[in-house]
Image (cartoon, grey):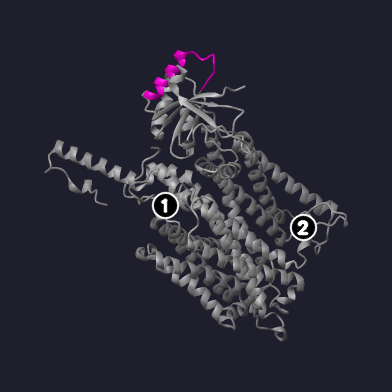
Amino acid sequence: MASNKYIVGLFDHEDKLIGAIRKCKKENVEITDTLTPFPVHGLEDELGYQDTRLHTAGFMFGITGTFVALSVMTFIMTTNYPINFGGKPNFALPSFIPITFELTVLFAAVGMVMVYCIRNGLFPGAVPRILDERITDDRFALSFEVDDSTSKEDISKVVNLLKEAGAVEVSSKEFNDDTEIFEVETSEVESLL
Amino acid sequence: MSHYESPIREPLIQGDNITYTKITDDIVATTEKAPPLSWWIGFIISATFAGIGVVAILWTIWQGIGTWGLNKTVNWAWDITNFVWWVGIGHAGTLISAVLLLFRQKWRTGINRAAEAMTIFAVICAGLFPLIHMGRLWMGFFIFPYPNTRGPLWVNFNSPLLWDVFAISTYLTVSLLFWYSGLMPDFATIRDRAKGKVRKFIYNALSFGWTGTAKQWQRFESLSLILAGLATPLVLSVHTIVSFDFATSVIPGWHTTIFPPYFVAGAIFSGFAMVETLMIITRKVLKLENYITVGHIESMNKIIVLTGSIVGVAYITELVIAWYSGYLYEQYAFANRATGEYWWAYAIMMTCNVITPQLYWIKKFRRNIALTFVLSIFVNIGMWFERFVIIVTSLHNDFLPSSWLYFLPTWVDVAIYLGTLGIFMTLFLLFARAFPVIAIAEVKSIFSISSAQARKHQLEENKKFEKDYKESIGAEYAKDDVFDTNY
């Protein structure tokens, strides 16, 4: 079970955030999450994230669509419901192409968006842990999970690192499972020390 | 900063004191304040038209298609004209968000959200026409292939009309997914600013619980790119298939191989015109001039002059090929189209689609907002008449002169068309009220490279460099034009 307590450093510019990430890497501090108001290019490389496999999923869904469309149309037009159109072939591949293409795109798009939502934990009614309400506005955040076993040296190391990297605000946040879904208790980070 | 951009490039975000918060404030403000009076006036007018349209649709369903002006030869007129017109308008949104994404055109960020919304509403309006033309609307599901007890009785997979069913429904679904996946982060922005609990709850549900972690953004970017890659051939396929409805028939005037590219160019042309009409009003009413700049309008005008010229070439090619074919009926169809009873419709089409957009070769006109607004409406009128000309002039004089008739619409035809305009505008106004009209996150992502402030900063750096250089080499040796920074 994940801890409910985080140290959160907020930055006011994406370049400062990247500086802080580099510093964390150098000093071997593990970042729990990086949150930004917009996609910052190159961020996933700085964090050492693996490339997403979403495109592979998209390809698999797409090829499924192709196969379904071609096989269903072929079955219907040649076996299940063959009609004689003036002696023209029942297996009329050229006229199957438009629908095959459309279903390939449809399957790929729908499947990929479903995978995207599942992997990101996105669904209507999801209750996110919002570390700070300004993250979707103009703040770039680094969060570090802490629990009772985290030593004070480690905490002060993180706090100092964030301050040195130019964080405009460093605080500790705690989620209480019993309270309102969006409520988070913010306190001075010094209380952890 | 992710990449270098030349300081002479026009900034995409204007204004002197823009910050990330200011961007959020400016765009979200429209959903937080009470709507202005102009919104209410627009809404009431649109809703009234929508109401008239609904009455006319119900009247059609009650009485039957006989209430329309269709006659013996013209068995397809305003309904299919409106259908093709609306589908065409629906092309700009996906083009802006998908094709321009693949081409890395950053100016799409200011207008893509509203253009995609427009696409979806236009496709909804388009879809209404085949549905009501069925007469028995409740039998609509017959067009889908599904295992049934009547036989087996299947749809005909060789029919372009069935391809159209697949094309339009796929297009609507994919556009909707594309649009919505981009909306989630922006709904989260609104949620995090929300004061009331209900508002917070609603926007959280709409945002699907988005938080903005680096992994989410990584997947987001990947998803946008692949959806763009899928939507690009899709957008071209949709109007291609719409054109097959005509091109695969044997009616002179319809049976031409030029139709697919010609229809696609026309669709992009009319779609951009509609985006301009809406955006020029939206930027003014919602005070978004800093994000939807004259530069954006100029870029769209460039696409309009390109696609308008393609359409013009297609019109002339059609005439030349009809003459060259040596086929009497084909020659008659085109001569009748240009000089017959419907010459006036042909003249409107030619003027609005080919002649007036040529003004955009001149930069001053491309950047003139009032002129752009007028011409964008001209283009939409012209494109409506293009479809009318293709459909009605090819049908009204058929192979049997005794059945030749002049087509005139009835009040029901007109009311349904105006009704879809009303439905479209009502949906758009509701969208402008409750949704972020501009993609907030995407605009922010170009802020540090393409804003007026970033340009100013670049110029200052250049001046500093110039000064240092002149000091080091001596002012009399320095070549002045190297440092021409007064762009």
User: Between tags 1 and 2, which lies in front?
Assistant: 1
Q: Nearer the viewer, residue A118 or A55?
A: A118
> Which residue is disc 1 drawn over?
B291
Q: How many marks?
A: 2
Q: Main secondary structure of the magenta part?
A: helix
**Which amino acid type is shown beneath numbered disc 1?**
Tyr
Dot 1: within a 10 Å radius of its alpha carbon, few (fewer than 14), some, or many (20 or more) residues? many
Q: Quadrant of the N terminus of chain B?
A: top left
Left or right, B274 with reference to A88: left
Dot 2: within a 10 Å radius of its alpha carbon, few (fewer than 14), some, or many (20 or more) residues? few
- Quick one: label 1 or label 2, which is nearer the N terminus? 2
Q: Is residue B259 visible?
A: no
Q: Secondary structure at mark 2?
A: helix
| Boundaries of the magenta span | A145-163
Where residue B286 appears, as percent x and y from the top left, is 45, 56
- Tell me, for residue B141, which label it has, or none: 2
Residue sitting at 25 percent across and 42 percent down? B460
Residue sitting at 18 percent across and 37 percent down? B468
In the rendered view, tell whether residue B454 sits above or below residue A176.
below
- Residue A151 in the magenta stretch? The answer is yes
Left or right, A26 with reference to B338: left
Q: Secondary structure at mark 1?
A: loop
In the rendered view, tell whether residue B181 sits above or below residue B379.
above
Residue sitting at 60 percent across and 68 percent down? B48
**Which amino acid type is shown beneath numbered disc 2?**
Phe
Quarter where residue A18 is shown: top left
Where residue A22 appears, as percent x and y from the top left, is 42, 25
